[in-house]
Image: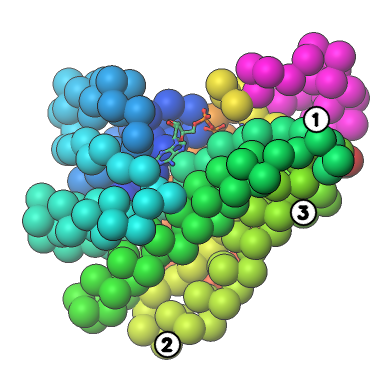
Amino acid sequence: MKLKDKVAIITGAARGIGEKTAKLFAEHGAKVVVADYDEIPGRETRDEIQSEGGEACFVKVDVSDFEDAQNLIDVAQEEYGSIDILINNAGITADGFLTKMSEEDWDRVIDVNLKGTFNCSKFAAQKMMEQEDGGVIINASSVVGLHGNIGQTNYAASKFGVKGLTKTWAKELGGRGIRVNCVAPGYTNTRMMDDVPEKVLDSIRDKNSLGRLGESEEIAHAYLYLSSEEAAYVNGAILPVDGGQIL
Ligand code: NAI
């Protein structure tokens, strides 16, 4: 029970890495706010946690929307009385070569991945500071946020940006006992990988020291470690969880 009675908001928790994280956190005693704009799978995640005896609620949110993000933090506060952990996990891709990328696809990915992280963190940090009891914020970067990648101009920019937010907030909030860290997952078996052609997946496996893609649970365990007291002296870190991926 590494998170007993901690209140954890996890964005993008309807499926993939976020879903596994929500379930793992609940197993460790957290009260979980399943936050997602996809309502049906989001409610299913909540129901599954509850049926295993865990505590969870669902909040529909588009993290790229400033007011929606504020509402998420307010509802979480009303439901559980405090906010201890925010996992900024929601993310999207809209790939294309630089010369073919539309303005709309650029804006969409930056709005969800980068602005969404800003939106939720701004309101969560305000609450954490008012509570005067510390807190944890974890941002999702990517292996692409470490090395860049062909066809991912918008995504790479957002995931490099998230590292900058992490370093900045670690400095701004550290003195208030709020730790801010970042996980940079490698290629992980989720729906995000559905559109990646098998040939590309083979080449990713070839260039991976462990010869495989990651699993959502493996990323969830990194979120868990950084959220726990075991990471009490970890702040401003960018933790790659990518099996040793070389791009
Ligand atoms: P996924 O596509 O399986 O799940 C993403 C979740 O975020 C979905 O439930 C979706 O509904 C939600 N979401 C998307 N836009 C949203 C918005 N505007 N507001 C609220 N919720 C929204 O993705 P996956 O693979 O679980 O990714 C989780 C995080 O990990 C993302 O930030 C992603 O960029 C990052 N990541 C994933 C990698 C992978 O290979 N799967 C590799 C590196 C990083």
Q: Which callout, 2 or 1, points at the residue further toward the start of the chain?
A: 2
Circle 3 sits on which residue? 146
* Magenta stretch holds residue 208: yes
Mark 2, secondary structure of its residue: loop
- Compared to 151, does 119 lie above or below? below
Tell me what residue is drawn at x 64 percent, y 53 percent.
158
- Compared to 95, does 162 lie above or below? below
**Residue 119, quarter of picture:** bottom left
Q: Which callout, 3 or 1, points at the residue further toward the start of the chain?
A: 3
Q: Which callout, 3 or 2, points at the residue further toward the start of the chain?
A: 3
The disc at residue 175 is 2
Q: Amino acid at mark 1?
A: Leu
Mark 1, secondary structure of its residue: loop
- Compared to 5, does 61 lie above or below? above
Instruction: Kindly give the residue lying farthest to the front in the view shown.
Output: 103
Q: Amino acid at mark 3?
A: Leu
Residue 188: x and y in percent read 64, 29
Instruction: Kindly give the residue lying farthest to the top in the view shown.
Output: 198
Mark 3, secondary structure of its residue: helix
Q: Is residue 163 visible?
A: yes
**Residue 20, quarter of picture:** top left
Q: Is mark 1 within 8 Å of ligand 1?
A: no
Tell me what residue is drawn at x 35 percent, y 58 percent.
66
Crowdedness near tag 2: few (<14), some (14–19) or many (≥20) residues, C-alpha within 10 Å:
few
Q: Amino acid at mark 2?
A: Gly
What span is in magenta? 193-214
Please report contact status of discs 2 and 1: CB closer than 8 Å, yes or no. no
Cα separation, mark 3 vs mark 2, equals 27 Å
